[in-house]
Amino acid sequence: MPKDATGGSPSAKPERIRRTGRNPEFEAALGARIRALRVAARVSQGTIGEAIGISFQQVQKYESGKDRVTASTLQAIAVVLGVHPGAFFDDEVSVLPSSRVADVREVVKMGQRIQRVRNPTVMKHLLSLADLLADPDGEQPATPDGTP
C-alpha cells in the first residue's frame, strides 16, 4: 500500500482536534458583562433583540450564560450598545474564576439599583464612595467635578 509524506496510509483520516466543550464559567461571565453593558446603556433586551433579529428571550439566555453567543451576534450587540466588541472581554470579567461569577451578578444588581437614584448629589456621593472602596492604595480619588 502506498504511503503519504508522513509515512501513513493516504486513506487514513487526519486526527481531529478534540473540542474542550462548553465553559459555563466563561459563558456566565460573558453574559453578565453583556447585561452590565446593556443596563449601563439603558437598553432593553427587547430593543437588542429587535435590532439584531432575535427574541428578547434569546438575549436573556445569552445574559444568563445558558446559550453561547456567536462572534457575529456579539458584534451586533456591541453595535446596538455603542461599545467596542472588546468591551465584553475586559480582563476583570472575562477570566473570572467561578467563585467570582456570583460577584459579577451582584455588581450588576447594584448597578441597576444605582441607576434608579435620581438625585444628582446622591449619585455624586455614591460614585465617590465606590471610588474610595475600590482604591486598593487608599489614595484619595478626584471627585466627579475633577477636584481632589
Image (cartoon, grey):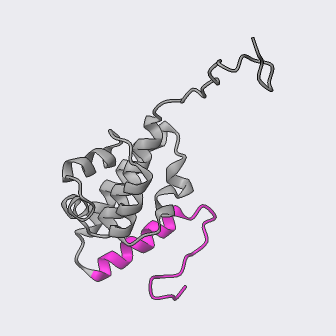
Verify whether residue 127 appears in magenta.
Answer: yes
Q: Quadrant of the N terminus?
A: top right
Q: Position of residue 126 (x, y in %)?
A: 37, 71
* Residue 109 located left or right of residue 57: right
Verify whether residue 126 appears in magenta.
Answer: yes
* Residue 52 located left or right of residue 72: left
Residue placed farthest to the top in the image? 1
Based on the displayed image, in which of its 4 quarters is residue 16 positioned?
A: top right
Camera-side residue: 59 or 114?
59
Q: Position of residue 35 (x, y in %)?
A: 33, 56
* Residue 146 located left or right of residue 106: right
**For the point 51% across and 56% down, which residue is it?**
89
Residue 116 in the image: above or below residue 28: below
Which residue range is magenta in the image?
A: 120-148
Instruction: Give the total of numbered labels.
Output: 0
Q: Position of residue 13 (x, y in %)?
A: 62, 21
Based on the displayed image, in which of its 4 quarters is residue 52 positioned?
A: bottom left
* Residue 36 located left or right of residue 19: left
Residue placed farthest to the front in the image? 1
Based on the displayed image, in which of its 4 quarters is residue 114 positioned?
A: bottom left
**For the point 45% across and 88% down, which residue is it?**
145
**For the point 64% across and 64% down, which residue is it?**
137
Q: Quadrant of the C terminus?
A: bottom right
Q: Position of residue 115 (x, y in %)?
A: 27, 68
